Amino acid sequence: MATYHKFLQVEGLNKSFSSENETKTVLEEVSFEMTFRDSLAIVGPSGCGKTTAILAIAGLLKPTKGTICFQDRIVTGPNRDIALVLQEYGLFPWKTVKANIMLGAKLQKINFSGRWLETIKNELDINGLDNLYPAQLSGGQRQRVALARALLLNPRLLLLDEPFAAIDTVTRERLQNQLLLVFQQRHFSYIIVTHSIEEAVFLGKRIIVLSNGTPSINTILDNPGMGEIGYRNKPEFFDQTRKLRAILEETP
Ligand SMILES: Nc1ncnc2c1ncn2[C@@H]1O[C@H](COP(=O)(O)OP(=O)(O)OP(=O)(O)O)[C@@H](O)[C@H]1O
Ligand SMILES: [Mg+2]
């Protein structure tokens, strides 16, 4: 597997949206780096620019200023090593589960073996759903189908924008565990955007707190204890959630 000097480097990222009579700056001076097999959570108040940042990293939004460098190259458009999972799942209601899972790979003309497909379905516990349609699935199952579609691409960077938002707490924790287990078995990095303090602390080795102020990054919280399922029950986990909550309360 190729190794890169810089896996992901976001440097001085600014993003403004202009309409006829005003320019609105959403992201200012956002800089951070990520290594391969690293994990990052992004939290912050609604409207502070989390989705904007994710879309810029995915190559779907052009920065107004600054650079995003992925695997030693400046990001100028979508990259086949980056996969994105959005909150609304992005599933096509008229396609079966199996067709939905294979859709991303087909669109990008990425070959995959039947074995790889089966492995992913097993890891996410969604085998047996192949011929159902999204409307016949629960929210948690839909979310796993969306995750399977992204993982089938064998991405080196997985971007998750509030992937588990519409799911009950127990199922949500199960999905977080599954993501963590897949992450430990596979070779990729991920960035997860979330509004949940617990989810950020459970899944992010570092947690970026974005704000509506300038610069956009309020704090980057190190979270070295993250990485095992049992972390949720450790005193350190509670300390970190308390710390993050206090930071968020102070964040404009
Ligand atoms: N294409 C666009 N044109 C104009 N303004 C935009 C565009 N996309 C986003 N914005 C504005 O940028 C700001 C940040 O939006 P963004 O979706 O990144 O926020 P967010 O942090 O993801 O919020 P949430 O937590 O609610 O998902 C918002 O004020 C939004 O209205
Ligand atoms: Mg958003």
Image: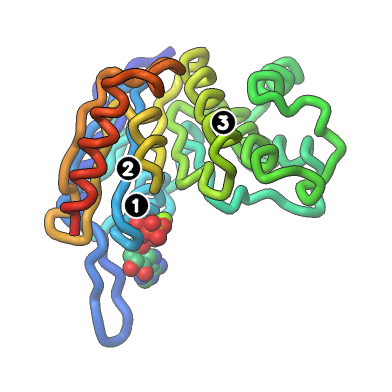
CB at disc 1 and ligand 1 closer than 8 Å: yes
Scheme of colours in the image: rainbow
User: In the image, 223: left or right of 124?
Assistant: left
Whole-angstrom CA distance, mark 2 to mark 1, is: 7 Å
Between 30 and 8, which is closer to the camera in this rendering?
Answer: 30
Q: Mark on residue 175?
A: 3
Horizontal and vertical percent position of residue 182: 53, 20
User: In the image, 125: left or right of 175?
Assistant: right
Q: Mark on residue 42?
A: 2
In the picture of the structure, the residue carrying the numbered disc 1 is 50
What residue do we see at 78% from left, 35% from top? 98
- Local SS, label 2: strand
Q: Mark on residue 213?
A: none
Query: Seen from this angle, which residue lies furthest bottom?
Result: 21
Q: Quadrant of residue 1?
A: top left
Nearest to N terminus: mark 2 or mark 3: 2
Disc 3 marks a residue whose amino acid type is: Leu
CB at disc 2 and ligand 1 closer than 8 Å: no
What residue do we see at 18% from left, 42% from top? 31
Q: Quadrant of residue 38?
A: top left
Q: Quadrant of residue 138?
A: top right
What residue do we see at 40% from left, 23% from top? 232
Nearest to N terminus: mark 3 or mark 1: 1
